[in-house]
Image (cartoon, coloured by chain):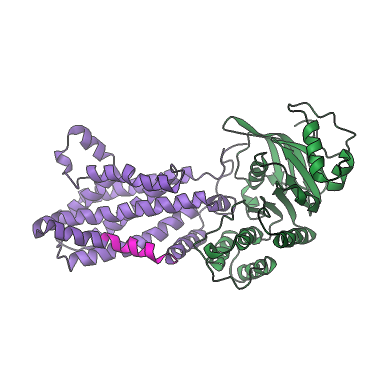
Chain colours: A purple, B green
Amino acid sequence: MNGERYASREFSPVLAGATARRVLTQLRHDPRTIAMMVAVPAVLMILLRYVVANAAVLNRVAPEYIGVFPFVIMFIVAAITTQRERARGTLERLMAMPLGKLDLLAGYGIAFGLMACVQVTLVLVISLTWLGVTVPGSAVPMAVVAVLDAVLGMACGLFASAFARTEFQAVQFMPAFVLPQALLCGLVVPRDHMTAVLRWLSDVLPLSYAVDAMQRITGSASWTSAASGDVAVILAFTVAALVGGALTLRRRTR
Amino acid sequence: MNSAEPGDRTGAVVSGQGLLVRRGGQLVLDDLTFDLAGGQVTGLLGPSGCGKTTLMRVLVGVQAVTAGTVTVLGLPAGHPRLRARVGYATQAPAVYTDLTLGENLRYFGTVLGLRGRLLAEAIAATVARLDLGGLDRRLVGTFSGGQLARVGLAVALLGRPDLLVLDEPTVGLDPVLRRDLWSLFHGLAADGTSLLVSSHVMDEAARCDNLLFMREGRFLAEAPPAEILRQTGAPDLESAFLALAVSAPPAPPAPPAPPVPQGVQR
């Protein structure tokens, strides 16, 4: 009688692809949003370069910021997009149609993942060339982790949007969910220097691992198992947020 | 439930037995038992807030049911196999305003399982049916109110559903468009589609083959317009609704209504 009586149809790559294309097409009709998604992290990096104005310090903090900016931007974009989908009734329409929840989430993941690749590529190219940031070894691990951070931000945004009744609330989640993480992730004060309580708090927040992973990658020329551990935690948080998102996408409301 | 027959009256595409929906502690649908005839336009009429939208959401499977059963096209309401066979249009158009008409129709068509030539044909037929030709490349956000309403309907019609559930599709539209839409609904019914169309505007009741009068989560009447007029002796359907609303008791027991043939409230 109630709830999800019928198991969802299995995953359909065609529908996930169609959904990703739809989301990207929506973005394409909104060039200003694309410009902001792609350009804002790069512009912030340029700003950081001149604020820091010290090559050694920049080399240390730049990678951390490269991990954080895409997370923040994807969080807000995903939270608003999903909230709109709920508020405008298209989510209800889709839930009455033969679309699986997984198709929808995967579609979002693919679309925003691709946007994250473009975003991260630009910020990395600018940082490593013009801004003179240097990394020991290849830049590829950094790019991979930055994209994973962006996807994590998207997954968290999707999940958070379920708790926003209005677009206005969704925007408020940015300071409410993201700023505390930004303060506790090691960007402002190294995590080892925090008091025990703050340290514990930072241990359970996903962004901390994004910053840790970046620190480890730039700390040594080769990939370390500690970096793998951080990446595993980032992936686990992403999956958990997506599962949470799927649970909050109810086909039937009470 | 009740003493009713098991809801499979010949030709019934939807039948409800003791349907009860409680939302946030409030009784929204109060023990509804009903049948919808196939190939007809059934009007669901009643004041705003009487439960019309909730009933429609139950039929399309997006509203959880507290008690009772609802069968749609032979399957329990909300069954995954129904999702491509039941078309649903909400009061708000529920389309992507930041996509063009063509992009909207292609996306929803793909979701409905249409591909390639079938998709192109379904889109062409729907666009023609709703007089949306030439708007393919325009952003839906730039459409007029009437065009927007038709896009919402177009998505509902796209998969050629066996049952169409339309929530106040004509409210707020100009008279010419309303007339065209009603003739479209009857055209679809003539082709074998069953339609449930809600409205809170009584002058639309006369355009339906069958009526469900609804008030405060219960049915006041379930019959064709002419029959309701005969039963109530009212000059028009609005007066009939008022007469039925006044004579309906506020609480459970069946109404001591005038001689009532089959089909009126239980």
Percent position of residue B149, x then y: 62, 58
Where, quadrant-wise, is the N terminus of chain A in this rendering? top right
Residue sitting at 75 percent across and 60 percent down? B179
Percent position of residue A224, x then y: 19, 52
Q: Confirm whether the magenta stretch covers residue B124.
A: no
**Which sits in the foreground, B142 or B195?**
B142
Residue sitting at 63 percent across and 71 percent down? B133
Looking at the rendering, the stretch of residues picked out in magenta corresponds to A29-41
Percent position of residue A128, x then y: 18, 65
Q: Quadrant of residue B251?
A: top right
**Which sits in the foreground, A123 or A15?**
A123
Q: Quadrant of residue A57?
A: bottom left
Q: Is residue A249 left or right of residue B19?
A: left
Q: How many marks?
A: 0
Prevailing SS of the magenta stretch: helix
Percent position of residue B66, x then y: 63, 33
Q: Is B23 placed above or below B56 here?
A: above
Residue sitting at 77 percent across and 50 percent down? B203
Q: Please say whether residue B144 is visible from this viewpoint.
A: yes
Where, quadrant-wise, is the C terminus of chain A in this rendering? top right
Q: Confirm whether the magenta stretch covers residue A35.
A: yes
